[in-house]
């Protein structure tokens, strides 16, 4: 597999530090609210990377953190009249619920900043001891001038940075580019005791402390949104490499931005949508399909119209799966050879995914396969052929996180469907239509086909 390494700007063969094992650290959410559609993209992208590496046979350790203390958390907690801990617990629970709807598996470890204060303090002490950090007015800052490689990931021209935009301004810093490792306690704010005084960690230091605790001094892959490249990831590199003397990550991956109806997403523009709100209208797997139907590094435009297109595309996938399941239950004496189509899907899928996680190409291969299968099985087929065709499709859908767990048709829905079938047999069309509406209210729909009645879950229900 080849990955475009943001550190070098080149597509490189993925060679993990330890044979047969791979680790990934991806920056998680700051849990002061429901996560928005821009957050959802890296969560989906790196979940897919994790799934694919597992598919290739790697033993994957995937770490995604929760930032559960920072300025946004403190402000939100005050506004809501709760503690920072209570706020974090609420939105961590909300994250798992919304992430599950998007087909995102829980990470191997979800470390919280507040549970790793001792690790953070130990790392800061090491940086001070080595001369890369200094205390000033109760705060502790990293001295960026002490790290010759500062800026090597982003290629940022540090002399042209607008102070106050991406760089925090403070009179207590030696240099404008220095960043806080520890912030002195303010009245009525959450704080911990430390050798530097009572306070709390800065944002950047938590990721270094937690990633190295679980994955070692050098990571295989560090991922996140493109907006985190500077200053967050740049700062992680500086503090980690000065502390250990080793490269922090072998590969860096960043997903592209999301625009909303062609405009940059921002709260001030009123176009910042939470996934929680979007899930009220669209199935989470539809949102995931939309995200993956473009290369992860490319910017994408988000709109309701485009989601509707993804909804139609997902319906094609589901329709093909339902047809194959039906043929398995109602086989016909019609020979169908799916070997050529299965091999083509296998080869094309691997080719695309091995090429810098080209999920758009992989999805294209899946739809070509669906088109071929629909033609091959137009008149039905024997059970084994249908089972083989479905297995080949589901294997790829699972890797992409597009295979929903089928809970089956609930007993209540099945009973209503039987009553409807009886009403149709008696040509009681009014009762048949009424029963169809009852079934629809329960989140299912019935299709009457030449091969019989099919029941499926309504998308978004």
Image: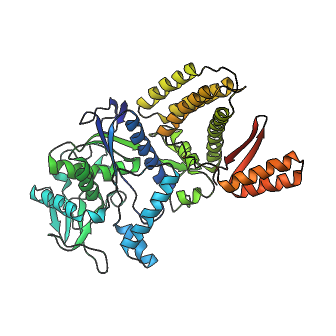
Q: Where the C terminus falls, by quadrant?
A: bottom right
Can see residue 236? yes
Q: Quick one: 28 or 331, which is closer to the camera? A: 331
Identify the image's colour scheme: rainbow, by chain, secondary structure or one colour. rainbow
Can see residue 364? no
Q: Where the N terminus falls, by quadrant?
A: top left
Q: Position of residue 197 (x, y in %)?
A: 17, 73
Q: Position of residue 367 (x, y in %)?
A: 60, 31
Q: Quick one: 326 or 399, which is closer to the camera? A: 326
* Residue at 41% from the left image edge and 77% from the top image edge: 82
The answer to whether 2 appears left or right of 265 in the picture is left
Q: Position of residue 28 (x, y in %)?
A: 38, 55
The answer to whether 165 appears left or right of 199 in the picture is right
The answer to whether 245 appears left or right of 364 in the picture is left
Residue 458 vertical position relative to residue 190 in the rendered view, above or below: above
Q: Residue 45 falls in which quadrant of the image?
A: top left
Q: Quick one: 46 or 323, which is closer to the camera? A: 323
* Residue at 17% from the left image edge and 43% from the top image edge: 246
**For the image shown, how many numbered marks are present on the structure?**
0
Q: Position of residue 223 (x, y in %)?
A: 36, 45
Q: Residue 46 falls in which quadrant of the image?
A: top left
* Residue at 49% from the left image edge and 35% from the top image edge: 359
Q: Residue 372 falls in which quadrant of the image?
A: top right
In the image as oriented, which residue stretches furthest toward the right? 427
Q: Quick one: 414 or 259, which is closer to the camera? A: 414
* Residue at 76% from the left image edge and 58% from the top image edge: 438
């Amino acid at each position: 597999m080849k990955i475009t390494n943001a550190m070098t700007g080149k597509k490189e063969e993925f060679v993990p530090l330890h044979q047969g094992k791979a680790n990934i650290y991806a920056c998680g959410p700051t849990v002061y609210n429901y996560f928005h559609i821009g957050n959802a993209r890296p969560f989906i992208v790196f979940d897919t990377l994790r799934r694919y590496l597992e598919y290739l046979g790697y033993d994957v350790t995937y770490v995604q953190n929760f930032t559960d203390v920072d300025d946004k958390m403190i402000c939100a907690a005050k506004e809501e009249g709760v503690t920072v801990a209570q706020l974090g617990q609420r939105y961590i629970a909300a994250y798992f619920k919304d992430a599950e709807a998007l087909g995102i598996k829980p990470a191997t470890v979800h470390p919280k900043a507040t549970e790793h204060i001792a690790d953070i303090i130990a790392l800061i002490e090491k940086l001070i001891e080595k001369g890369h950090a200094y205390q000033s007015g109760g705060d502790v800052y990293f001295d960026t001038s002490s790290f010759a490689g500062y800026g090597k990931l982003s290629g940022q021209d540090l002399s042209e940075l607008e102070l106050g935009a991406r760089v925090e301004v403070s009179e207590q810093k030696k240099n404008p580019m220095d960043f806080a490792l520890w912030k002195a306690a303010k009245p009525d704010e959450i704080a911990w005791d430390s050798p530097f005084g009572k306070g709390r960690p800065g944002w950047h230091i938590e990721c270094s402390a937690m990633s190295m605790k679980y994955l070692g001094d050098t990571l295989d892959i560090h991922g996140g949104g493109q907006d985190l490249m500077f200053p967050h990831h740049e700062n992680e590199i500086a503090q980690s490499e000065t502390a250990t003397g080793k490269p922090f990550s072998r590969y860096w991956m960043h997903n592209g931005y999301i625009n909303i109806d062609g405009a940059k997403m921002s709260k001030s523009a009123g176009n910042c949508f939470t996934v929680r709100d979007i899930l009220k209208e669209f199935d989470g797997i539809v949102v995931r399909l939309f995200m993956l139907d473009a290369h992860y590094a490319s910017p994408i435009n988000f709109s309701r119209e485009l989601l509707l297109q993804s909804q139609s595309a997902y319906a094609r996938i589901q329709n093909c799966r339902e047809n194959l399941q039906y043929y398995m239950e109602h086989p016909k004496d019609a020979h169908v050879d799916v070997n050529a189509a299965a091999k083509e899907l296998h080869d094309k899928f691997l080719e695309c995914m091995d090429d810098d996680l080209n999920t758009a190409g992989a999805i294209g291969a899946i739809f070509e396969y669906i088109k071929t299968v629909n033609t091959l099985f137009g008149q039905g087929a024997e059970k084994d052929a249908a089972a083989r065709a479905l297995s080949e499709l589901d294997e790829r859908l699972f890797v992409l996180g597009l295979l929903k767990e089928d809970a089956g048709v609930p007993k209540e829905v099945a009973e209503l469907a039987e009553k409807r079938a009886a009403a149709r047999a008696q040509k009681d069309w009014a009762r048949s239509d009424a029963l169809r509406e009852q079934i629809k209210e329960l989140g299912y729909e019935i299709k009457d086909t030449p091969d019989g009645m099919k029941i499926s879950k309504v998308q978004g229900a």
